[in-house]
Amino acid sequence: MGTDVMEIIDTNIILRYLVKDDESLYDEAKNIFKKAEDGKRKLLVKVVVIAECCYVLESFYKKTRDEVAESMEVLLSQKWLKVEDRVALLSMWPWYRESMHFVDSFLIACTKIDGSKILTFDRILEKRSSEKIEANN
């Protein structure tokens, strides 16, 4: 695969890399990421893939919210990855850690970044999205 073709990473590559439950697939995922880090591959991470990773890590692998958030923060911070909505994805974890759903946390982060407002019937989401951001977030 040439370096000019963008490759969209699927959930299973990220999961194999993070959970290391299959040594050969972990090695393959690690190799894919290493080639991207070396500039030999262009990888794109979509928001929907991160949402699915979080769901699977929590539900199937029984990871805590903190473990999931920490893994995602490290992964999504890698400059050699092209990450869809990187700023919002990197900003959403405080709400996610507080047991907000992935999508709700992502939407709240979006409002904090661009000053938009969430249109919702969910009173908790509406309240949380209108709260002032804390200094440590």
Image (tube, helix red, strand yellow):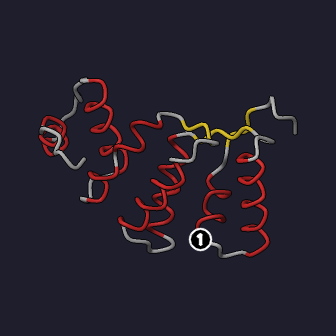
**Drawn side of residue 94 relative to residue 28, left or right:** left
* Residue found at the far front of this picture: 38
How far from the left and from the top, in percent, is residue 79?
58, 42
- Residue 25 against residue 52 in the figure, above or below: below
Provide the secondary structure element on which disc 1 rests.
helix
Quarter of the figure with residue 105: top left
**Residue 34 locus on image (x, y percent):** 74, 54
Residue 130: horizontal and vertical position, in percent? 14, 35
Residue 52 lies, with reference to residue 1, above or below; the image says below
Question: Mark 1 belongs to which amino acid?
Answer: Val
53 to the left or right of 89: right
- Which residue is more in the foreground, 95 or 40? 40
Left or right of 11: which side holds 64? left
Task: Give the quarter of the figure containing the N terminus.
Answer: top right
Q: Quadrant of residue 81?
A: top right
**Relative side of 45 to 29, left or right:** left
Name the residue carrying label 1.
Answer: 19
User: Looking at this view, is 136 or 44 the one in front?
Assistant: 136
Residue at 79% x, 31% y: name it. Answer: 5
Task: Name which residue lies at 47% across and 33% down.
Answer: 85
* Residue 8 placement (x, y as % from top left): 68, 40
